[in-house]
Image: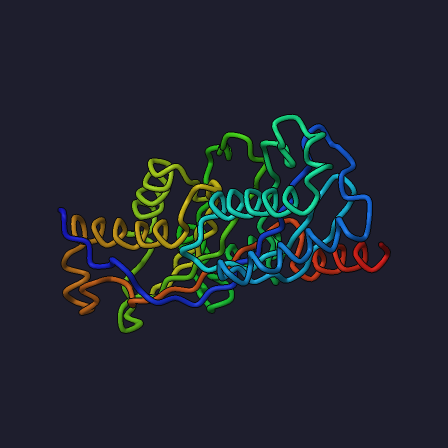
Amino acid sequence: MDYEPFKDVPCAYTLHYHFCFQTKFNRPVFQTEQHRECLSGSLAEICQNKNYHLLEHRIEPDKLYCLLSLRPEQIVADVCRTAKGNLSREFNLRFAELALTFKDRALWAQGYYVRSVGKASRQAAQQYIDNQGEHHGIRNKQAVEIMRWVNPKPYVLQAAHADFDLSYHLVLVTSRRRDVFDEYIAPGLFQRLADYAETEGGYLERMSLLPDHTHLLVKTTPSANIKTCVLGLMNDSWKFMNERYTGVLKATEAYQLWTESFWIGTVGDRTTAMIKSFLSKGRQEQ
């Protein structure tokens, strides 16, 4: 089936990322106030020009930490590439004599570090997703167990030159908020979406299905466009329902399965508030 009902839909989102760029060979380059001011000013200008929201940053002699809020269509790997390239150019222009001492005029090491963070921790999101059945008052314990799922496969995502951990809490609501799903549909849908995510280079960690909405915890690589990933999950689940449960979609009049919108937020081992406090405290001490 080639038709896909969801090509571009509005969404609500909170997407926060903690980055670290390290100088090549761990050189202690940013030693003076002028160095730090140049790097800080260039970072602010890049973020303004590229529509990245800079929440906080911190500069150490051999590292730059920054906390960015991004839009769903902005790709983490591209943000890293753009930021490092522009920062290197501006710093090398400002401090040309210092740059001449760098091999190949390379300011930064090739790789980078990035972690997703959010208003809630990943552990809190996992517990929230796992407890959806009880939270919504489903009393049938067997049904509750069937309609929640944790991926039995280990998490193995890799990307060249990147140390990363990117996790997203995704919420999808059925069309017209109709009661579409039950414990008979759940197992097949879980497996279908897990297989789809794996095929696309992602990882579906866990999922909780309610009659009229679902919560998912998804992991991706830095090169993934998270909005494209979500649209793919929406379209593939719609195809699954059309292939196996057309009668359910007709009976509930949820022909497109999902409402044409979604909510997504980053989560991580640390919260946004924790990282912001860590970065701001270090910057104030300099």
Q: Is residue 39 or residue 5 the one in the foreground?
A: 39
Image x and y of residue 131, in percent: 53, 59
Image x and y of residue 34, in percent: 77, 52
**Residue 182 appears left or right of 263:** left
**Residue 283 appears left or right of 147:** right
The image quadrant that residue 106 belongs to is: top right
The image quadrant that residue 80 belongs to is: top right
**Residue 117 appears left or right of 254:** right
Q: Residue at x 61, y 27 (%)?
A: 104
Above or below, comparing residue 115 to residue 5 in the picture: above
Q: Residue at x 45, y 49 (%)?
A: 75
Image x and y of residue 173, in percent: 35, 66
Above or below, comparing residue 216 to residue 63 in the picture: below
Q: Residue at x 30, y 43 (%)?
A: 192
Q: Is residue 98 or residue 48 the one in the foreground?
A: 98
The C terminus lies in quadrant: bottom right
The image quadrant that residue 6 belongs to is: bottom left
Q: Is residue 120 or residue 244 the one in the foreground?
A: 120
**Residue 143 appears left or right of 31:** left
